[in-house]
Amino acid sequence: MATIENAHFTTLKGAYDTETMEATVKVRRFNPETGKSRFDTFIVTIPVTATVLDALDAIKDTCDGTLSYRKSCRMSVCGSCGMRVDGGAALACKVPMRKFVEAGHTITVSPMGNLPVIKDLVVDMTPFWDKIRAIKPYLDTKNADTPAKEWRINPADTALIHKESLCILCGCCVSECISMESDPDFLGPAALAKAYRFVGDARDKDTRERLRDLSGAHGIWDCTRCYFCNQRCPKGVDPRDAIAKLGAESFKEGFTSDAGAKHAKVFVDSTFKGGYLRETELVPKTIGPANAIKDIPFALQLARAGKVPNPLSPHKAKDNDEVKRLWKLLEKEAKGQPRRATAVHPDAVQEG
Amino acid sequence: MQERYAYYPGCLASLSQKELDSSTRAIAKKLEIELIEMPSVTCCGAGDIHEAKPDYYLHISARILGQAEQSGCDTILTICNVCTLNLRQANMALKEDAAVLNRVNDNLREVGAATYQGGVDVRHLLWEVSAGEGYERFKSIAVKSLEGLKVAPFYGCQILRPAKILGFEDSDRPESLERLIRACGAEPIDYPAKVKCCGFPIVLAREDVALGELVQPLEQAMDAGADVMVTPCPLCHLSLDAWQRKAAAFSGREFGIPILHLAQLLGAAAGIEESELKFKRHVTRLSPSVQAKLQVPSVVGTKV
């Protein structure tokens, strides 16, 4: 353990008042030369207004110059200092230290997840950028009707992609994505939110191709809806909601052959056919009858426990004709509407 | 805690996970709360309808909320994480925008359905019995101590995240299940994956990805020495219980850990019988030692 008497703050000199506090910070270290990891604990004196990033700066300036991490703007704009604070990904420059110090709590700082560690808190962002590139992160107007001057968009159209446009590519959502832990090839929350930013852009003319690609393997239907991405995003992008919007747009374009889309369709159909989910239709309609037959031994395990409802008498809710009429009404209404007309998310941007 | 709730068991508890419905009704009776039926409700859409047909999702949710309102209740009681998130999400969207609510109500009226005025809250059983008066009331009916039973709490995702829609407790360090496990006289086991995912939403469409997710909580709970796991969500339950053997084959490791619904754990501590808790409806059966620790009357003798 290293203790320092820190009288001056290189990066903070003159910026804040001088009231200070003593903070203890545990940092996960990784040495690429030896391939070994360890935890170091530092005690530093920092201003009461300091963030986790300020604490790391104090450690690096006065205690251990070999500590490695990324940083740039120090104001939650550049997206460089993504790392885990007590296990949850965050921008180090956005997390105040004071609440931890006052609680007598030693924070643990570690690198982001789902990305290879290069040294200490620095991760290799290559897989992250590869996925961003894979979704074509640029406007494709197919050269159609390009205006001679600037391209004017009405506020209602920009509102549709406002949240997704807030992304600063920090990787905090990717760090926590559970489907990526299980399938490293999953495009993941950052790339998919970026994809929606273009799918939802009124000027983009590549919509069908984009949605076709996104609704295939390792795409939108890989998302397990754990909502860690929404929870961690420091800018209120809500990537999971963007993925749901891509699902809705895929349905509108008729890209419903993926097992994930078929799964969703059974839920939709069940409601207006009867009310509750038709569980016995879910398996054969999602994975196909041939695969369902292969799964018969598993189905029998469930049946023995009484977990297979009688397929011949599916649930019928009372007054379900209302729902049938509702479905027809909305389908009729949707036909007359332009694409991108619907999105149901409590949409207020809340920065985490 | 309310005296009466509009009860929304959701699909799974009404169909394949009936043991959850009967345990919930039994524990509600002990807690002296009245559950009002809503015979005309549909599925909440499980996130699937939200994703495929968001406008339709909003309307069927408003219809469910409207029916609760018609029944004279101001709170819907849910027993499923996915129902909780989906109904709360739609409720928030309807309440925060009067124009949206008006349009939805116009459509509901047109098809002859009850409209929704925005006066209903959606709350999970876990929230109602783990704090405040509900917690005190549960402690007073927890007559049996499940001493020696080591219980791994598994929260699942959609009762914690996104916190701006759920927000009952710290989504990274929740304590409600631990509090209830202690109130049952049992011992909560801690492990990091208790707030992670069971993989259920994609277990059919992406089985390998889902099993990779499911293995984490199973392995960690076993390694931490748990006798059983408990979850507030019937989807997590189905994944942890029924897909457990597939997870074992996937990971090359034996599990065999029984999974309890929250209402079953509470019910066991309240002295409710097997005829209502229905542990025999689990795919992963209770071992004799767990049966002994749970002390559920007449649970012994079920065929394994």
Image (tube, grey):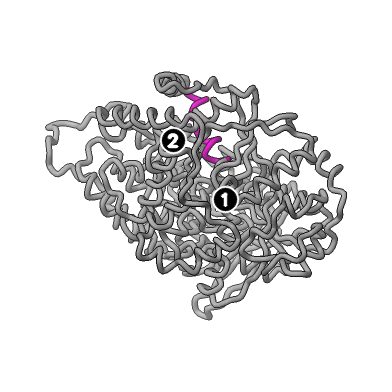
Q: Is B244 drawn above or below residue A235 in the view shown?
A: below
Inspect this view and state whether residue A275 appears: yes
Q: Report whether A164 appears left or right of A317.
A: left
Q: Which residue is mark 1?
A: B157
Q: Report whether B274 appears left or right of B171.
A: right
The kind of residue tagged 1 is Cys
Q: Which residue is mark 2?
A: B57
Using the rendered image, report if marks 2 and 1 lie on a common chain: yes
Q: Which label lies toward us, 2 or 1?
A: 2
What is the chain letter for disc 1?
Answer: B
Q: Position of residue A278 (x, y in %)?
A: 46, 47
Q: CA distance from mark 2 to mark 1?
A: 20 Å
The kind of residue tagged 2 is Tyr
Which of the 4 quarters of the picture holds residue A205? top left
Q: Residue at x 50, y 79 (%)?
A: A33
What is the chain letter for disc 2?
Answer: B
Q: Position of residue B35 (x, y in %)?
A: 69, 34
The mark that comes first in sequence, 2 or 1, is 2
Pick whichever, A141 or A320, lies toward us: A320
